Amino acid sequence: MGTTRYGQEKWRIFIITLGLGFLLATSGYAQDTVDEGKRVSLEYTLTLADQTVIDTNVGKSPLVYTHGAREIIPGLEKQLIGLKVGDAKNVEVAPAEGYGEVDPNRFQEVPKENIPEEARSVGKRLQGQGPDGQMMFVQVAEVKENTVIVDLNHPLAGKTLFFAVKVLKIESAEAQKVEIPGTAPEAQ
């Protein structure tokens, strides 16, 4: 029994489709979703409830992080699970899952002479060095006669955050490992 031209063409299309499906599946492109250990590239815009734009990388380099490695705030990370390349989502993050609530214990009273004169007004932001040498950012909360009260809370503490995100790329974390010359590979 001979194979007709139509039958040959049908098998050829099936084989090509099967091969393309295999390539997409093995490249991770077709089925990759944001999940534990994946390297994710995001485009985002962060706004507050009053629509003030706090930060955006639209038109710039993407934010690249490893999902589950605590490299981004927990409330955002949880909302990204399961998204695929090209997916866009609006995410609302409560303070407890963002930068925390405002902690009243993180307000300190310092002598006025320790604050530059031009920064002695409510709302001014200052940069300094913490006890361990790390950079710290503080905001003037109150100016008294001889002292200044500074707020050591994160500037976004106590605020609900609104992210507009788009997943640009998802890769396995293994694809990102780079061997440094002169170092031994990790023991298996």
Image: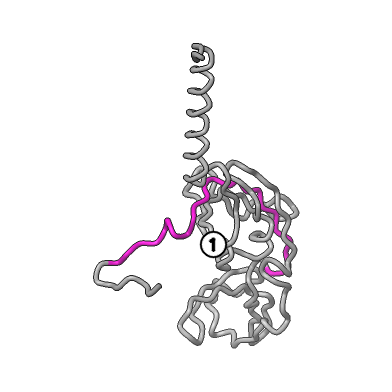
Front residue of this view, candidates 143 and 184: 184
**Residue that appears at 30% across and 73% down:** 184
- Please identify the residue farthest to the left as the structure is shown: 182
Front residue of this view, candidates 107 and 182: 182
Q: How many marks?
A: 1
Q: Which residues are magenta?
A: 157-180
Front residue of this view, candidates 148 and 171: 171
Quadrant of the rendered structure where residue 58 is?
Answer: top right
Quadrant in which the C terminus is drawn: bottom left
Is residue 162 located in the magenta-colored stretch of the structure?
Answer: yes
Provide the residue designation for mark 1.
37
Q: Is residue 110 above or below residue 19?
A: below
**Residue that appears at 57% across and 50% down:** 56
Image position of 50 (left or right of 63): right
Within-10-Å neighbours for mark 1: few <14, some 14–19, many 20+: some
**Residue that appears at 49% across and 17% down:** 8
Front residue of this view, candidates 32 and 87: 32
| SS state under label 1 | loop
**Residue that appears at 54% across and 20% down:** 10
Image position of 30 (left or right of 83): left
- From the top left corner, tell me how far across and down residue 65 is, in percent: 52, 59
Q: Is residue 36 above or below residue 5?
A: below
Quadrant of the rendered structure where residue 69 is?
Answer: bottom right
Is residue 155 located in the magenta-colored stretch of the structure?
Answer: no
- From the top left corner, tell me how far across and down residue 104 is, in percent: 73, 81
Residue type at the position of mark 1: Gly
- From the top left corner, tell me how far across and down residue 169 is, in percent: 52, 47
- From the top left corner, tell me how far across and down residue 42 is, in percent: 55, 50
Q: Is residue 25 above or below residue 117?
A: above
